[in-house]
Image (spheres, grey):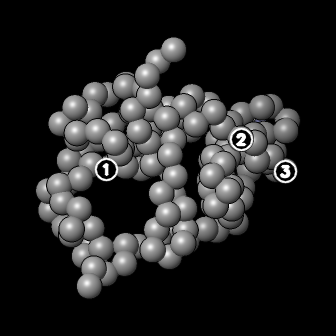
Amino acid sequence: MTPNRPSPEPDLSSVPFYEGLQQHCLLVQRCPHCGTIQLGELYCNHCHADGLQWVPASGRARLHSYVHMHMSYHEGFADQIPYNAATIELEEGPRFYTNIVGMDDQALVIGMPLQVQYSTLSTGTVVPVFAPRTEQ
Ligand SMILES: [Zn+2]
């Protein structure tokens, strides 16, 4: 039996993010004072205001960086080797770690356009993954 993959553990700065993902909605934080868009914070990174609002993101992103994983660092991923681990940059600005799906890992290109998709873990938690997007 394949061991479970580790699942994100939402904290005060990310509970709404994961609640949105359960509804297949990618949310980002918007500062009500200066409009800065960010993720994973309790206060605005620019003006330190509180009361950050959660707003839907476009789901469009670009590949910022990636690696090909050839070793198993957690038994929950052993059956996925080789796989990619990537950082993406949302059109709105925030970056985060994810996986790129729906394509050959050897064809990954920094800056390529991506679109969010949603992947449900064995725990029921939904996480964002990204697939290639045809630019319009
Ligand atoms: Zn602000």
Q: At 34% from the left edge and 42% from the top edge, which residue is drawn?
A: 102
Circle 1: residue type: Ala
**Residue 29 place in picture, x, y as percent:** 71, 45
Relative to 104, residue 122 above or below: below
> Of callouts 3 and 2, which one flags the residue occurring earlier in the amino acid sequence?
3
**Residue 83 place in picture, x, y as percent:** 23, 53
Relative to 71, residue 89 above or below: above
Determine the secondary structure under disc 1.
strand
Q: At 76% from the left edge and 47% from the top edge, which residue is drawn?
A: 54
> Of callouts 2 and 1, which one flags the residue occurring earlier in the amino acid sequence?
2
Relative to 74, residue 35 above or below: above
Q: CA distance from mark 1 to mark 3?
A: 32 Å
Q: CA distance from mark 2 to mark 1?
A: 24 Å
Disc 2 residue crowd, few under 14, some 14–19, many 20+, Cα 10 Å: few
Which numbered marker is on residue 51?
A: 3
Disc 3 residue crowd, few under 14, some 14–19, many 20+, Cα 10 Å: some
- Of the two numbered discs 3 and 2 in the rendering, the one whose residue sits closer to the viewer: 2
